Structures are given as structure tokens and as C-alpha cells.
Image (tube, helix red, strand yellow):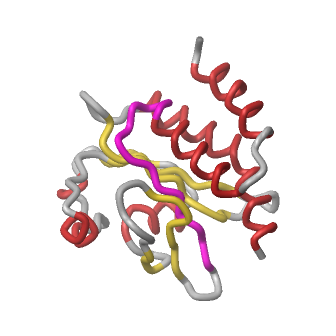
Amino acid sequence: MNKFNEIADFGRELASLEKSENVLALITKKAKHLVNADRCSLFIVDIEDEILWTKQSDGMGRIVIGIDSGIVGDTYRYKKAQVINNPYEDEKFLPQIDKKSGYVTKNILSAPIFNSKREVMGVIQLLNKSRSDFDEKDLETITFFANYISGSLELVLLLEK
């Protein structure tokens, strides 16, 4: 089964869920599976407080960073997905998060999630692809996936307000 058919099947499963926590957990689980990543975080944009914060993240509690901080902030600012395969060599990378958690980030795939007004409402970030670096095919898959899940994420955020 190709990745796009797999995402369509995922949509049927996503539509059957009622609780927002289950929706977000399924999104991160599927994203990791699609690109063979170890971890996935969903960052939410808070324009008023100028922060990005994790609504769902693997392996650690809530992460809060400035809206223009790190790879996630860069993804938000430029509204463009990106692959960083040597994060410790990238000036935008925030090594203090690894230091705090004890996790070692080897590579990053990050993509904006747009709302129905075409504004970035969140960023999906995947870490540590198993056995290789992230590539253009992974970037294409997660960009498609981010667009696919945008309506579900927007609905979850609206229902929680």
C-alpha cells in the first residue's frame, strides 16, 4: 500500500474518534509510522503570548518555546517544511531541550499545519528517523499529512476553547 492510500485509511479511523486526546495521539502515532521516526510532537501556535507549545509530545512533558525559537519557530515563521539532518550543527537548533530530557536528536523533519484561513496554527515535528536521515520523500509525505490532518486539529482546538 502506498503512503497516500495509507493516509486515506487513517482518515477513516480518525473520523471515528470522539475524544480530542485520542485524535492527537493517533495523529502522532501515524506520522511516526509514515516516516519511521522515533518521536513526534504537535506544537500549537499562540499568537497572543508569542509562544509555540506542545499539545502532544513523545517522551517528555509540555515544551514551550518562543514563537521564533528553534527549528519549529523557523518552520512557523517561513511557513515551510524542512529537514535538518545535522541539528547540532544548525544554529536554530535548541540543544537545551535534549539536555533537559536526556534525548539525543539526530535528525528533524518539521512541517507547518495550516488552518482554514491558511494561517499556521501548528507545527508537526518528527525526530530521529530509524536507520537513515530524513529525505525529500519524507518531506513530501509529512507535508501532505499535515494538510490532511489540519481540519481535525483545527476542530480539536476550537472545541477546547
Residue visible at 80% across and 68% down? 158
Q: What stretch is highlighted in magenta?
A: 33-46
Q: In this view, does 37 lie to the left or right of 157?
A: left
Q: Is residue 113 left or right of residue 43?
A: right
Residue visible at 47% across and 32% down? 33
Q: In this view, does 151 lie to the left or right of 85?
A: right
Q: In this view, does 154 lie above or below 16?
A: below
Q: Is residue 3 visible in the rendered structure shown here?
A: yes
Q: Which of 83 and 129 is in front in this view?
A: 129
Residue 41 at x, y percent in the picture: 47, 56
Q: In which quarter of the image is residue 122?
A: bottom right
Q: Which of 11 and 45 is in front in this view?
A: 11
Location of the C terminus by quadrant is: bottom right
Q: Quadrant of residue 117?
A: bottom right
Residue 42 at x, y percent in the picture: 53, 58
Query: From this viewpoint, which residue is outermost toward the bottom?
Result: 49
Q: Main secondary structure of the magenta part?
A: strand
Q: Does the magenta stretch include residue 111?
A: no
Q: Is residue 55 above or below residue 5?
A: below
Q: Is residue 151 visible in the rendered structure shown here?
A: no
Residue 64 at x, y percent in the picture: 44, 76
Residue visible at 18% across and 57% down? 89
Query: From this viewpoint, which residue is outermost toward the top?
Result: 1
Q: Nearer the viewer, residue 160 or 99?
A: 160
